[in-house]
């Protein structure tokens, strides 16, 4: 649309164009021009009849804008748009309401990071009811190009929880279609061979870092999670009764597990210089992870072996394959909230039971064979 000719008035910075009113009558449409923060601005002041606008009135509006006593049209529009968003239950507003109802645990911190990094930039100003399956398909595909399937699954599941929260609290209409989650195969059970375990123990023995080796040994001897080990305080170790108290585990409820002699010996050799057993350097533990990685490398362990998580798996696999520990006891030792997680070790226990059963058969056969050999010998003597 061509820009209509601006006609000057007797007031500086005030111009008008000739337009048509709603009744079809010719009327003037006034504009004001001024500079603000180095920018040249022209904006509509009002119409002659519809807004009872005059050149003098437009000049006063211009002066107020220059002095900062009133907002420009653009700023007022942006402010109005923001106020509208605040009144609506956008994804961002729902998240702020959602987190008010949740305890500030480690899981909350991770969820908050996922929301701010991945959901807020794309969906923050949108309403759940306006989202389509295609919107979420695009989001999922975009994330899969940058993140692991498990991470993407957690992000999409977080959006699902926000939607359920909106429905449950009757705040607004949630997503009314199924959110597709990426398929994840996370049933990897890491286990070291006897030779790999020997190399690892030697590497730990030779390492000079005061904490890296002991942390790995505690993971191997107790099956505790990395976060649980790093969070341990001396008050959590009950040397007298032989228990380790685990505060705020993954399952949520505090737990306690037996303190075996091997783990006890590791703890007893550590200096008590801090309330934390493994305080790290000036409270920063990034150096610990590098040191643990160095031990793994020196031991020549597989690249995909996750040192602490893998040693937890090795602990569980050893017990399961021994055939001496049932899955219920293993679940309690690993502090699994559900037996479903412990089921990944069921096949190892089954193999141990098969070996035990096979051994029983072989022992019986040995007795039978000896009896037959004895009978043959007696027959020959006759």
Image (tube, rainbow, N blue to C red):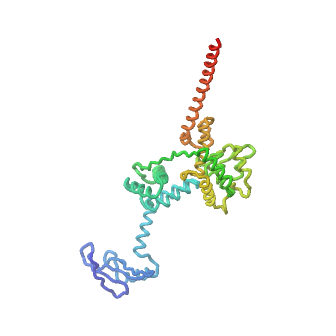
Instruction: Depth check: give the residue in front, 180 or 314.
Output: 314
> In the rendered image, is residue 170 in sight?
no
Residue 2 lies left or right of residue 124; in this view the side is left
**Where residue 121 sits in the image (x, y, percent)?**
45, 62
- 291 up-or-down from 367: above or below: below
**Residue at far top of view:** 382
From the top left corner, tell me how far across and down residue 82 is, in percent: 44, 66
Residue 204 percent across, percent down from the top left:
66, 52
Q: In which quarter of the image is the N terminus?
A: bottom left
User: Residue 23 falls in which quadrant of the image?
Assistant: bottom left
Above/below status of 121 relative to 311? below
Q: Is residue 337 above or below residue 277?
A: above
Taking depth in this image into account, of 176 and 144 the one nearest to the observer is 144
Of 93 and 68, nearer the camera is 93
Residue 261 percent coordinates (x, y): 71, 44
Residue at image location 38% in from the left, 82% down from the top: 33
Quarter of the image with the C terminus is: top right
> Residue 338, relative to residue 3: is it above or below?
above
Q: Which residue is drawn at 40% across and 82% down?
A: 34
**Horizontal side, residue 178 vs residue 206: left or right:** left
């Amino acid at each position: 649309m061509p820009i209509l000719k601006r006609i000057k008035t007797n007031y500086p910075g005030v111009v008008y164009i000739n337009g048509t009113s709603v009744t079809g009558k010719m009327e003037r449409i006034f504009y004001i021009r001024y500079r603000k923060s180095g920018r040249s601005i022209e904006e509509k002041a009002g119409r002659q009849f519809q807004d009872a606008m005059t050149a003098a009135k437009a000049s006063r509006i211009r002066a107020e804008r220059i002095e900062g006593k009133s907002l420009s049209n653009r700023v007022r529009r942006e402010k109005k748009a923001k106020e509208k968003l605040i009144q609506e239950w956008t994804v961002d507003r729902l998240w702020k309401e959602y987190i008010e109802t949740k305890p500030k645990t480690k899981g909350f911190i991770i969820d908050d990071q996922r929301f701010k990094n991945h959901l807020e930039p794309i969906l923050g100003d949108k309403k759940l009811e306006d989202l389509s399956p295609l919107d979420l398909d695009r989001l999922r595909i975009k994330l899969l190009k940058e993140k692991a399937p498990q991470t993407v699954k957690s992000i999409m599941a977080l959006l699902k929880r926000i939607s359920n929260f909106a429905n449950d609290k009757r705040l607004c209409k949630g997503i009314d279609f199924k959110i597709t989650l990426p398929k994840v195969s996370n049933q990897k059970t890491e286990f070291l061979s006897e030779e790999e375990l020997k190399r690892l123990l030697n590497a730990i023995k030779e390492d000079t870092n005061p904490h890296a080796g002991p942390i790995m040994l505690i993971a191997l001897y107790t099956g505790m999670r990395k976060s649980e080990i790093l969070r341990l305080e001396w008050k959590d170790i009950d040397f007298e009764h032989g228990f380790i108290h685990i505060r705020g585990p993954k399952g949520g409820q505090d737990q306690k597990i037996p303190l075996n002699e091997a783990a006890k010996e590791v703890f007893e050799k550590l200096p008590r210089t801090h309330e934390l057993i493994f305080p790290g350097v000036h409270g920063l533990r990034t150096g610990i992870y590098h040191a643990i990685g160095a031990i793994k490398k020196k031991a020549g362990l597989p690249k995909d072996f996750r040192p602490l998580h893998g040693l937890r798996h090795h602990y569980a696999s050893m017990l399961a394959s021994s055939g001496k520990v049932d899955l219920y006891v293993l679940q309690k030792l690993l502090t699994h909230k559900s037996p479903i997680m412990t089921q990944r070790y069921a096949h190892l226990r089954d193999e141990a039971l098969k070996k035990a059963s096979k051994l029983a058969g072989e022992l019986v056969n040995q007795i039978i064979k000896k009896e037959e050999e004895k009978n043959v010998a007696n027959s020959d003597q006759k």
